[in-house]
Amino acid sequence: MGKSSKDKRDAYYRLAKEQGWRARSAFKLLQLDEEFNLFENVTRVVDLCAAPGSWSQVLSRVLIKGEKFGRCAWQDREAKFRQHMLNVVPSDGAPEQGKTAVEADVSVKEDLKPRRDVKIVSIDLQPISPLPGIITLRADITHPATVPLLLKALDPDYDPGTMNQQAAQPVDLVISDGAPDVTGLHDLDIYVQSQLLFAALNLALCVLKPGGKFVAKIFRGRNVDLLYAQLKTFFEKVYVAKPRSSRASSVEAFIVCINFQPPAGFTASLEEPLGVGSRLPTMLVDQNAVAPITAAVLMQNHQTGAWDSAPERAQAAADEHGIFEVEVDDLSAEPQDKDIRWIAPFVACGDLSAFDSDASYKLPDDHVSLDPVQPPTAPPYKRAIELRRANGGAYGKPPGGK
């Protein structure tokens, strides 16, 4: 499929090239910011699974260069519109009263307000081309050795010999746009993606400050509400967001967690990650010890016709005819408003007037096919491209050619 047909098929693919973004995924982060104001009072950020660097590029242009996108740009447009409606700003573009043209030009440049003490760290297994002001690490977010590297990048005075896995200077925002190479087996893809999300969350818990935010890609599946409930343990608000630039035909969405509130006494560590962690051997021993008892109880219940989740209590309550009377626990002591199942609210992000990522748009007759802003540094198909080029292209060398 050629570039022109791909430009015609996906509006955001071409729009990213026109606006200088490395990938179309930059619009996903910008549309999430429009809805949730992610960059408000943010100066320290960790970008996980960052390659090719489009989300890091957004952070660089917003936080370091001071450009306005997302909610800030929307608020600016609203403010200028109100000023024009109130005739505060002349509509002909002339300088305001009392200001020369030079002063008006300076005021426009002052709109770029870089933030102070910005620290952005990007991590990925693949190499990332340099970005202004971005610290890039080539590491595996699922490996415990990544935590000291990240803490050292965030704080140059960090001593890895202390074995401390908590950041002395925590970050305000952790984002992750990582996803596995999909196989087409949806259950498997959803499971692998959930494990990648847990790896990102385990790393975020080590560096995120109270009140911080966490944004990550998820694949919506059958039991995804369990994942939402687990995230609700650490964050006050949890949303599921679908940006307009994300194709509706895709199962991807983004989990947006706001106001990090770790439980009392919780200490994050990749040596003891969320889930099983190092408790697996103990859990296996306990499970094997319970398994024979469970099998015997099932056989007994099958013979007597009584199926009970608590066989010891039921056996004690059996009458002279061998009938088991099952006692139901009294639930009246439980609070009536206790949440049994919690479902995160689903939010659609992006202006309805924006491009539809699933639609095809006709290109103008004088369009020019655009090259990528930043070609992949080390794509997995690089060797295949070199071999095809050596053989004369997609159709091989012509007869008699050298």
Image: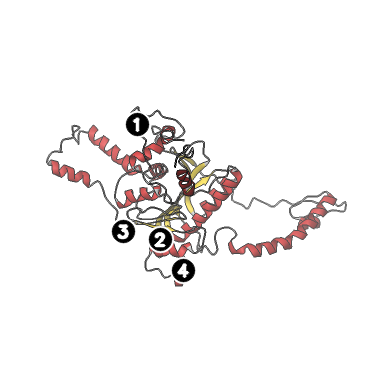
Reading the image, the residue beneath label 1 is 367
For the point 81% across and 52% down, the residue is 301
CA gap, disc 1 and disc 2: 47 Å
Question: Gap in Å between the C-alphas at discs 3 and 2?
Answer: 13 Å
Q: Is residue 58 above or below residue 202?
A: above
Between marks 3 and 1, how big is the CA–CA gap? 42 Å
Q: Position of residue 236 (x, y in %)?
A: 47, 51
- How far apart marks 4 and 1 lie (CA) works out to 56 Å
Its colouring scheme is secondary structure
Q: Position of residue 332 (x, y in %)?
A: 64, 50
- Name the one closer to the observer, 306 or 359: 359
For the C terminus, which image quadrant? top left
Disc 2 designates what residue?
170
Q: Are the residues tagged 3 and 2 within 8 Å (C-beta)?
A: no
Q: Secondary structure at mark 1?
A: loop
Q: Residue at x 53, y 52 (%)?
A: 196
Numbered circle sitting on residue 117: 3
Residue 256 visible = no
Q: Secondary structure under badge 2? A: loop
The crowd level at tag 4 (other Cα within 10 Å; few <14, some 14-19, many 20+) is: some
**Mark 1 or mark 2: whose residue is earlier in sequence:** 2
Q: Amino acid at mark 4?
A: Asn
In primary-sequence order, the first of circles 3 and 4 is 3
Q: CA distance from mark 3 to mark 4?
A: 24 Å
* Residue 164, numbered label: 4
Q: In the rendering, at what x and y percent does residue 19 appear?
A: 33, 40
Q: Residue furthest bottom?
A: 161
C-alpha distance separating marks 2 and 4: 13 Å
Of the residues under marks 4 and 1, which one precedes in the sequence?
4
| Disc 2: CA contacts within 10 A as few (<14), some (14-19) or many (>=20) | many
Q: Amino acid at mark 1?
A: His
